[in-house]
Amino acid sequence: MKRKKMPYFMPLLLIMLSLNACGDQRVLEDLGLIQTVSYDLLPSGQLDISVSIPQADPETSSDREVLSAAANSSKEAKMIMSRKTGMLLVSGQIRNVLFGESLARSGLKGHLDALIRDPSISSQIKISVVDGNAGELLRDNYEQHPRTGRYIDMLLEKESQGQTIPKVTLFNFQRDYFDEGVDPIAPMIRKQDSSFITTNGIALFRDDKHVARIEPKDSLVFAFLKGKFREGEISIDLTAPGASKEVVMFSSITSSRKIKVAPGTDGAKKIKIEVDITGSVLEYLGDLKLSNERERRLLEDKVSHYISKRADTIVSLMKEHKLDNLGIGRYVRNRVGFKQWQQMKWREEIPKLEIECSIHVKIKDYGKFR
Amino acid sequence: MGKWKERLKSIFIEEDPLTSINDSEKDSETDSPNTLQSVEQQPLTLQHILDQFDDSADFVHNAYLGDRMHVMYFSHLVNEDRLERDCLPPLIQSENPLKHLEAQSMYKPVSAPKQCVEGILSGMAAIIFDHHAFLLDVIYPASRTVAESETETVIIGPHEAFTEQAYTNLSLIRKRVQSSHLKVIKLAVGEVTKSDVYVLYIKDIANPKFTKDVIKRIQDVEIDAIHDTNMLIQCIDDHPRSVFSQFLTTERPDTIASKLVSGRIVCLMDGSPTAFSAPSSFFEFFSSSDDYYQRWSIGTATLLLRFQALIITLVLTALYVSVTSFHYEMIPENLILTLTESRSKVPFPPIFEALLMETTIELLREAGARLPTKIGQTIGIVGGIVIGQAAVQAGLTSNILIIAVASSAIASFVIPNYVMSASFRLLRFLLIILAGLWGNLGLAIGMAWIVIHLSGLTSIGTSYLSPVAPFEPYDWRDVFLRMPFSMLGRRPSQARSKNKVKLKMRR
């Protein structure tokens, strides 16, 4: 009875042996694992693509290999680059994609397509826009940070935890891009004095085109408006003109946001963004006495007022460029119903919207100093 | 096949020391396979018995009372001291020895020569007075004393283990299960060796169907010799071609007692220090009696650790192979450089590298198991250096692989049952080869095959994967967890006991 089973095994064994070595074997040490890619637009219309590959071979002195190519598409560039290296270039370990500002301004649509379509590329790779030339930033070596790709990755990761830049992965970006009623954003980075890379605010996109930028000092205010988060830090200069210096620094910020839409006859009439912020005061230079409840309330109001003002400038910037990076459109869409939403030209509506930002700051803790 | 057997017989039978038995087998082939049949057909005389034991240097034959009384025995099987001091003097001095023999109950009269020969073989002394034969039970065989288990040690709990002496083993069990319901059935296996096999069960707890089945299977075994329980179970299990042992073997009397009480049937064999229980489930092999002697939370944690060990020992090296040769995407960013760096000097593809190291580990393990303890230590040191350091420095393997191979070796020793851990060590090689050929797909195929195979197995007709399939959630609290005793109220469903509830304690 059992003996019948033997013939099943033999063909299986034959298939196993015959299929050996064909297929897609990728032995680790033969691979050039692309860690970071940068895309730039050349004046000729071609793409300037650079990749950074960490070097693991202990016999070479360099920590990484950088390859560049000018080509019409990213996959073509990969082929050109692969002619220059002994390793098989693979994109399964890409962690960062850097887009040069020139390219970001002309639209990222096709390049995103190439990234999403390749199944070996993770949807968790980080997207950022470089203020200036992305290839140059990637090709440069920064003395104190031997592997530039890794330096950028760690910088973005750490900064996004503190909310000074948003964490934008390929998934986030494409979802915002394809979703109706929200426009994508991406963190911006910039080379500073040829020895550092620094984050440089937030790039605001209209569909796939980068059009405006939020300054680094306002990026946390943008985060307040964008959604809820825990853990963040903000330093606020409340010094009124002519008065003595007053600076307050908040830490351990917890923030939550609500968007309320009051519908009008032909769409949304009034949008109210309510933000509740609680945080600990870690540093305060000023005349108010924080242990006094009344004076503490005064400071809370001052800070709320300050943040509201900054929020208003962000909102007006977006109105000016007809942007909706906060995703207000999604709330409007839910409020008015999809049918009306489809009839509405949302982008044209944005400048006409009445948006009110109401910010409530609460000091939950002000330290041991009374 | 038949021709071959005949030819083999004709070659070997000439020099066979068992010629007489073989001859007698030929004579009686038609009636029964019993090799000693011929003896029975003859009347019991001294000469016949002496004929049976010609060429037996250890056979003792003494004549007393002017050739009227003959005492025969194997010197190493009987307590000669007792025989010479307590039994023979009163017999020789008595006026009517025959009356003395008949009066005393310790002298068992026998009439059939077969019975007499078997008695002598089992270690009794035969006394022939004129034409009356008696057997005297003065069995005192050489055996080692009850010692600590070498293969199944526990930290706390009883340290006794079975010995090669079935009577000792039975006494160890009786001591633990002091109930008249504990029944022992004696059987014999091995056409030549006639080893005693004892089937134990607790009446009213064990399912009589299983008991009957086990007894029938043991009776049906036709093999010339069986030397150990582990050999016996391969002759009686449901799927002899499987890599998995379908009966749990143990040398711990406390484990056996718990199996009996849970409604399982236990078998002991004379000459083997292991007993087996039936029916067994796959998951029983991962439980140790230690789990029950420790607090329940610690027992549960240990139990879960063992299942982790199972996964590690099966998959870890294979996963290394499949990841390094196919799925570089899976490796975390921080690990990939270390991994590439350690692989960069290795001249072999990952599958070859892994098979090389796994074979080395298996060689070491086998060498350690066979060598005397004193030399065994040297193997440990040499192996440790070869595997741990030199292989990496020589660029033969990557050190990450060493970690994978070593931890899967360690994990394989965490599995309490050696037979089961050996099965998994073998399957590991299968998975490594599949992973080297097809990557994670191969790994998945291999794992699926193992699961399919396991779910097809049975142990005396019950599902081997019980209580997972058939799904018995109540049993999970004993199999995957070790809940407090108050929550383990039922006997395992696999035993199909009529007497399901085992405790009514509410605490």
Image (cartoon, coloured by chain):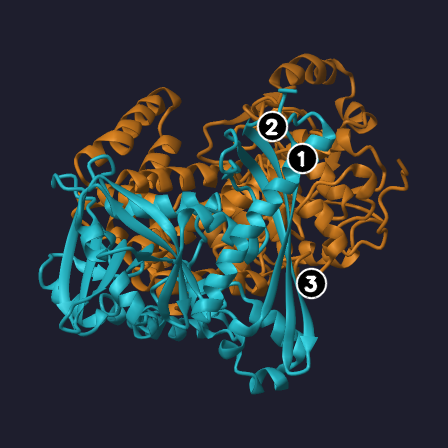
| Chain ID, mark 1 | A
Tell whether B471 sits left or right of B455. Answer: right
Q: Quarter of the image containing the C terminus of chain B?
A: top right
> The disc labelled 3 sits on which kind of residue?
Pro
CB atoms at circles 2 and 1 under 8 Å apart? no
Q: Secondary structure at mark 1?
A: strand
What separation in Å lies between label 3 and label 2 (alpha carbons)? 31 Å
Mark toward the viewer: 3 or 1: 1
Q: Residue at x 66, y 29 (%)?
A: B168
Q: Which residue is mark 1?
A: A364
| Amino acid found under the numbered disc labelled 1 | Lys
How many numbered circles does the render carry? 3
Q: Which mark is residue B470?
A: 3
Residue position marked by numbered label 2 in the rendering = B154
Q: Is residue B235 visible?
A: no
Q: Quadrant of residue B380?
A: top left
